[in-house]
Image (cartoon, rainbow, N blue to C red):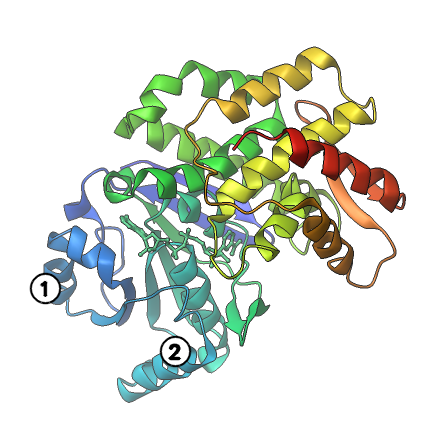
Amino acid sequence: MKKIVFESGQDEVKLVSAKNLDDLFDSLVTDIKYCVLADRKVLDMHNSLREQIKNRNFELYEISNPEEEKSIDSYTNIIDFLDSRSFKRSDCIVSLGGGAITDLAGFVSSTYMRGLNYVQIPTSLLAQVDASIGGKTAINYGKIKNFLGTFYNPSLIIISPEFLSTLNEQEYLNGFAEVIKHSLITSENAVDKLIERDEKIKNRDSETLLEIIEESIQIKASIVTEDFTEKGKRKFLNFGHTFAHGIESINLSQPILHGHAVIIGMMMALDYSKHLELIDIDVYEKSMKLLKSFNFDFSNIRLSSDEIIEAMKSDKKNTNTINLVLLKDIGSPYILEETNEERLASFIRNFIEHFEQ
Ligand code: NAD
């Protein structure tokens, strides 16, 4: 078991890897109470987990529909559950699931009695490389996603690539979009390392996955440590995301996977960087090739340029500009506060017209 300690904001977070799911809880101290908030589907797919939880006398709270249960109702049910079992601040919550449960468990941990101990076991690739890092917690409020939240770090993150064997192909790629993003905003070396391991990634080779997850975590952790509350550099993590949010918000009736919208969003950001002559053509082509080298299925994504433009305009919040993270070079993201809405709108129309789904 390898141990890495990294900073996230002002906190120190320990990361351990468990190659074998039988070792999953070995690094937890034994003299406190634990409540595992777990994705029922993950428990059903990985047989030994319920037994391990029972043998260790941990409390277990099962969640059947993670994104639906990232809600106020479910939050209060969990608080009641913890209270009925007399959990104290010195006790500990363990999240065991994808990003939705990571967000929910983080929100519970940061607010129950003003904060109790928190350990994460992220089980989707997206949760391992993205949602578990950076301390953002959230629940949805009505139809507004992530409306309530806090910044709160776990003390320990336990990563096992074993979990990824049961993710379906598109859920796996969903997380991979963030890995690609991290490499593009970081360095040519990070991109080359991904390209070299392309086959092993596609075959979900366990050791390669662990390396990639650790590298991706280090990238995100170093950015959020410099800028925990997103006033500067952390915004680079939004590369492709302004376009992606526009796409996601016009697909709400049949929600699409975030990572798939992010891949299209990064293609749009690269194309716009080329359009504005910010990026060299060879860098553009290399980056585009990386984005196109995995089998992302975009067939169910509705792309209507006029609606995307409207959605992006209404997402401006309190500013007069549409903020876009573009790329000048691999490893050199650039924030454009776009005021020329007509120029952007005509670019989006042209991109969508030529985009092959
Ligand atoms: P999720 O938790 O809903 O999981 C997606 C699906 O994968 C679910 O059906 C889940 O049951 C299933 N699943 C999870 N692990 C599995 C496994 N090992 N095998 C088989 N199936 C498995 O969502 P997600 O895609 O992991 O993450 C998206 C959520 O994360 C969103 O709610 C998003 O807002 C949040 N998020 C948070 C941050 C952050 O910084 N806090 C960052 C990115 C995303």
Mark 1 residue element? helix
Pointer 2 residue Cβ closer than 8 Å to ligand 1: no
Q: Which mark is residue 255?
A: none
Q: Quadrant of the N terminus?
A: top left
Viewer can see residue 156: yes
Q: Secondary structure at mark 2?
A: helix
Viewer-proximal residue among 207 and 146: 146
Q: Residue at x 50, y 41 (%)?
A: 260
Disc 2 to disc 1: CB gap under 8 Å: no
- Which residue type carries mark 1? Asn
Q: Is residue 309 left or right of residue 12?
A: right
- Name which residue lies at 76% across and 20% down: 279
Q: Residues within 10 Å of mark 1 (few under 14, many from 20)?
A: few
Question: What residue type is disc 2 on?
Answer: Ser
Q: Can residue 149 be seen from the camera position used here?
A: no
In which quarter of the view is residue 286 placed? top right
Between disc 2 and disc 1, the foreground one is 2
Q: Which residue is mark 2?
A: 74
Q: Residue at x 57, y 52 (%)?
A: 248
Q: Which residue is mark 1?
A: 55
Q: CA distance from mark 2 to mark 1?
A: 26 Å
The location of residue 309, given as percent across then percent down, is 74, 49
Q: What is the quadrant of residue 223 in the picture?
A: top right
Which of the two labelled residues, at mark 2 and mark 1, occupies the earlier sequence position? 1
Label 1 residue near ligand 1, CB within 8 Å: no
Residue 298 location in percent, x, y?
A: 48, 38
The picture places residue 139, in percent across and down from the top left corner, at: 50, 70
